[in-house]
Image (spheres, rainbow, N blue to C red):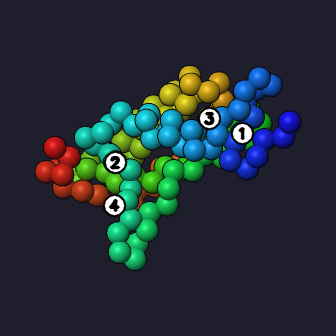
Amino acid sequence: MVPTSDEHETARDYRIATSVLEAMVKGCLGHADRVRLAHGSGLMRARSVEVIVDGGSCHVTLPLEARFGEVLHALAAEVQDEVRRCVAAMTGLEVEAVDIIYTGVYPIADAE
């Protein structure tokens, strides 16, 4: 049985829908007060979470906004490690890459 474009075969005995993979990635964000998923406004529309599966591995693209004052490269490394660990544990997929795209920053007051 061949997977549809909205689901990915990760093993012979089960499949995971793309929407489920994307929801898993969103759920892996344990840095809720430091980052949030990007949301577009006006003419600037944020890209959505994207998970591309190729065989037993995947590539994640994650658009985020960071709390103002965060060290972006260090925060990205933390988020990448967490998403890799989380997705691999839940799916058995090897996470080849987690690309973080910062689309904005928000004031500290918005984080509370």
Q: Which of disc 4 and disc 3 is earlier in sequence?
A: 3
Q: Does 20 sit above or below residue 102?
A: above
- Which residue shows up at 30% across the image and 39% down it? 32
| Residue at disc 4, secondary structure | strand
Q: Distance between the residues labelled 3 and 4?
A: 25 Å
Q: Name the residue under label 3.
A: 95
Q: Mark 2 points at which residue?
A: 36
Given the image, on which type of amino acid does mark 4 rest?
Gly
Q: Name the residue under label 1.
A: 8
Q: Is residue 59 visible?
A: no
Q: Is residue 52 left or right of residue 9?
A: left
In front of the other: label 4 or label 2? 2
Q: How far apart are marks 1 and 3 (CA)?
A: 14 Å
Q: Distance between the residues labelled 1 and 2?
A: 26 Å
Q: How far apart are marks 2 and 3 (CA)?
A: 21 Å
Given the image, on which type of amino acid does mark 2 rest?
Arg
For the C terminus, give its image quadrant.
top left
Q: Does 60 sit above or below residue 43?
A: above
Q: Distance between the residues labelled 4 and 2?
A: 10 Å
- Which residue shows up at 71% across the image and 32% down it? 15
For the N terminus, give its image quadrant.
top right
The answer to whether marks 3 and 4 mark residues whose Cβ atoms lie closer than 8 Å is no
Q: Does 52 sit above or below residue 31?
A: below
Q: Which of disc 3 and disc 2 is earlier in sequence?
A: 2
